[in-house]
Structure formats: structure tokens, C-alpha cells
Image (cartoon, coloured by chain):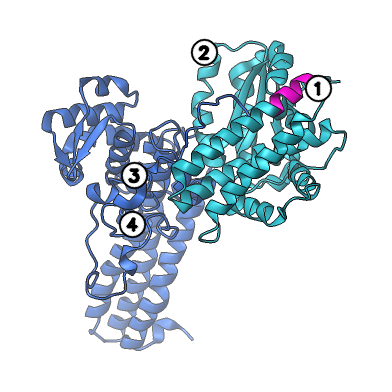
Chain colours: A blue, B cyan
Amino acid sequence: MNPFDLPGPAFLAFYWLVVVPATVGGAWLLRRQLERGEIPDLDLSNPYLLAYLRGGKQQVVELAVVSLVDRGLMLTERGMVAVRDDQAVLAVRSPLERDALTRLRQIQPKSVDALLRDPFLDASCEAVAEELRGRGLLAKRGLSGVRALVYLLSMLVLCGVALTKIAIALERGRHNVLFLVVSAPIACLIVRRWANPRLTALGQRVLSDMRELFAGLRDRAQTIVPGGGTAELALLVGVFGIGPLPYAIFPHKSALFPAPLPAGAFGSSNSSNWGSSSDSSSCSSSSSCSSGSSCSSGSSCGGGSSCGGGGGCGGCGS
Amino acid sequence: MKVAELESLGPVQAVLEDFVTRTQSAFGSDLASVVLFGSAAEGKLRATSDVNLVVVLRRFERAQAEQLQRPLRVAQAAVRLTPMFLLESEVPAVAEAFAVKFDDILHRRTLLFGTDPFAQLVISRAARIARLKQVLLNLQLRLREQFVSRGLREEQLVLAIADAAAPLRSCAATLLELEGRAAGSPKEALLQFVQSLSEKPWLSLLERLSQARETRRLEPGVGTETLFELIELTRCLLERSERLTEA
């Protein structure tokens, strides 16, 4: 059966149910194939690269706040943050953290939300983004290179099919082609959106690899020792966001990153909305999962002083 | 056995391979060997286990060591990699000073790079006895302090119990060997030691100890009793170690 012989409504159904999904799927597969490559040698000790890759500026700002507060270089009170003192700016090595502290000193105290709206980190974030683009992990601005080619091919298919049918219809003396005339550009817009996601296929693969590499870290998040002695807390937030960050390790979480309460959170005796802070295993990707549950202050967590003393007996006894 | 053969370690293998490569690149000809020891060397790594390495160097230079700072932070976060940086010349002295740990290394190790720095290593009996007593005393003091300071918080007690497992097992292995009764693994050594005690049924304690170590969780309400029993068990080990003779 020749689909171009289908009557108008049936052809429109064929166009939207077969041609458009097939073109979108084909474009997606072709783009993935063309954007493949060797995993680049990324500096994994820089959690800001991973945070930006995962969710852009919002994730970077949240990570900077968590990391700097954890290390005592940023202070927090009533949901606001401020720089500890003048020495704090000199103590950090990361340009991004230095920019954050320098700017915060001028405008402090500020909430994390206000920091997010302030353009102070735009330049630093752009430097991170440029590095990620240079390594082929983040899509270039606009539609260019491989993506432009894929989009062009998709447009040719979508418009070609539509124009062919229109031509046949007109030839047969039918003029009810308005729906098809409108459908083709809409389909092209849909393909454009699918053809140009924020991350490249390689970037998605790196992100997925990172989640796998640090899966153990997420599982043992409760045992992280606060204070910045290791990169564990920063990498946890960099790779997974603040969702899996336990309140016991970072008691300021709910004050600094208040999540909007879901409807009915107070309405029933079922307190499932006030669950534990650390089980966000399903919450691994986007910026929308930044705050985990809506548990309040975590005041019962005890400050995470779990490292014990050792009673003054040092040495490598075990 | 090389890293490439450590298939039982799963994702840890890739991190180890990368870290060994970066260590080679950082220290160059000053790197003598890299040795994996502990449960990872036995292929019995658990989610909560540390991955222990000994990096033996000819020199420890600042510029070289700095190159390893970033890779180490990543490896620590990814798989709890815990390296010990030793100079070749320090091996005998360090082995004597930390005899229980090195006793464990002598029994459970895998060479990942270079030549085995411990192949000819002999730790004196006197040093092993002295260190065994010191470690047990240290553990006992620490457990008492944790019992008092964390006793009101069950989940904190469980962490203390979990952290006591490795030194207790290593001490049991060293003790049995010093008594001339070598056991298989440190875990088996502790079991063997417990079975040799007639005073109390300790087997359920060992089960709880393993559970705490592997899952960082225990049944509600048993933490206090378990930690106190560990103090008792440590005392038993210490008493037995007091009977050892240096000859």
C-alpha cells in the first residue's frame, strides 16, 4: 500500500504516528552515533566540572555553598550564607570558589536563592562550560556541526514527505492540505528540540560512568566525615546533587535549600514526606532533585561527630 | 597477581589500575612497588571495606607527591582507597613498629607493581608481641571511651563496633600465630580464638560483629551489649597475649 494514496485524515495519522516518531528516533540514534568518542581525561577531582555537566549553574552554586560551608570558609545562619573572614578568600585554590567568596563578601549575607540569581558566578561557570564543550561533553551553543547535519536531514525527511503528499493532493484537485502544511513545521520544531539536548552523547556517557564510579560513595554517604578532609562530600554533591546528602553530615541542608512542600504534606498522619535524608537513590540526575525531602532542621542528627576519639592512642594499630 | 587479574574486585579494579598508573607516572623511577593488602588482596572486598595499599618509594619528593593529590582524592571518594607511603629503607623499622598490621600484610597481599618489598621481611617475635599488646590496649581504651561517649546512640555504637572488627581479627591472627597455631584468614583466626574460650558463648557476638562490619546496622537494642562484649573479648585477647613469651 502506498501511504501517499491514503485519504487526508489517515495520512495525517500516518504522518504523526509513523513518520514523525521514526524521524525523531532516527535523528536521536544518528546523533548518538556521531557524537560518540573516546572518554576524555577529565579532572575528576574537580567536582564543579561534574556538577556543571549534571545541571549547570544551579548545581555549581549549590555545590560551592555545601563545600565552603562544610570546610568552615562560609558561615550560615537562618538560611543565609556569609564569608567567614578575609582569610577565607585566600584559603581556597579553586578559581570558582574564590570568585564565589569574593563576591559574597560584597553582598553578604545572602540566601542560596539570591546567590543563584546573582550573575557573580556566570564567568566562572562559563569557564567550566567551555572546558566541558572543549572535551565534547556539553553541546556547543546553537545548532552546529553534527547536530545541524542531523537536523537538516530530519527536516528534509519531514518536509519532503509533507510536500510530496501536498503535491499529490493538489494534483488530484484536493485543497484541504492546511493541517499538513501546519504539521510539517511543528514536527520540525519537535525534532529540533530532540536533536539538540544540553549534553552530547559522550557527556551523557561520562555522567553515567561517574554515577557508576561513585555509586559506593552514595551508598555510604552516612559515613562521610565532615570538614573537607577528603573530597567525598564535594564529589557526592557534584555527581548526585544534594539529594543524597545526609542531614547528619550537613545539618544546614534544609535551611539553605528549602524544598517546596508538596500539597498535603501536613494534611495527614502519614509522615512519609518527612523521611530520611539519605535515601535518594533514585534522585540522581537533574537539578530538580536538589533538595531531597522536606525534613526540617535535622536537629536530632547530632552533628555527625562520628569519628570518635581513640582515647589518645594514636598509631596505626589496626 | 597483577591488577588486571583482580576481576573479583569489580569496579574497584578500574580505580586501582588508574591509581597505580598515576603513581608510576608521578614517582617514575622512585617508585619501587605497589602492594595491595587486606580483604581486597583476598578478593573478599565488601561495600564497606577500605582498599589498602602500600606504596614503597625510593624517595618522597614534594613535586612528585603533589601529582598524586588529585587522583588520591578521587580514589578515596570512589572506593575508600587508603594508601601508606613508605620508603624502601623504612620497611624493616616500620614493620617492627606496626607489627600487627605488617603481620597481616605478610599474610594477605598482592603485588600490583615492582618487586615484592616484603618477600624477605621478618618481624621479630618480640616486636610482634609488644605491638600486639599495644594494639589490644589501644582498642580496649577506645572501646571503653566509645561505650561511654556513644552509648546513648545506638547507630553510633554500631559504627564503633564495625570499626573494631578489623583490629580484633588481625590481633587474633597474630596471637594464634605467635602461639604456633596459624589460622587461615584474620576472620577465621578470631573464630578459632573464640572457640578456644570456654567461659562464654561468643559465637553470636562474632555474627553481630560481621553484620555490623558488612551492613553498618544491627538489630535495635543489641548495640550496647555487643560493644560491651567486645570490650570483654579484647580483654581475653589481651590476657592471652600476656602469656606469650619472647623466646
Residue range (magenta): B125-132
The label shown at residue A250 is 3
Furthest-front residue in this view: B199
Q: Secondary structure at mark 4?
A: loop
Give the amino acid at mark 2.
Ala
Q: CA distance from mark 4 to mark 2?
A: 42 Å
Marks 1 & 3 on one chain: no
Give the amino acid at mark 3.
Phe
Marks 3 & 4 on one chain: yes
Marks 1 & 4 on one chain: no
Q: CA distance from mark 3 to mark 4?
A: 13 Å
Residue A259 sits above or below residue B71 on the image: below
Q: Nearer the viewer, mark 2 or mark 1?
A: 1
x 54%, y 39%: residue: B144
Residue labelled with disc 2: B63
The label shown at residue B125 is 1
Residue labelled with disc 4: A292
Residue A227 location, quadrant:
top left
Q: Nearer the viewer, mark 4 or mark 2?
A: 4
Residue B1 visible from this viewpoint: no
Marks 2 & 1 on one chain: yes
x 65%, y 51%: residue: B210
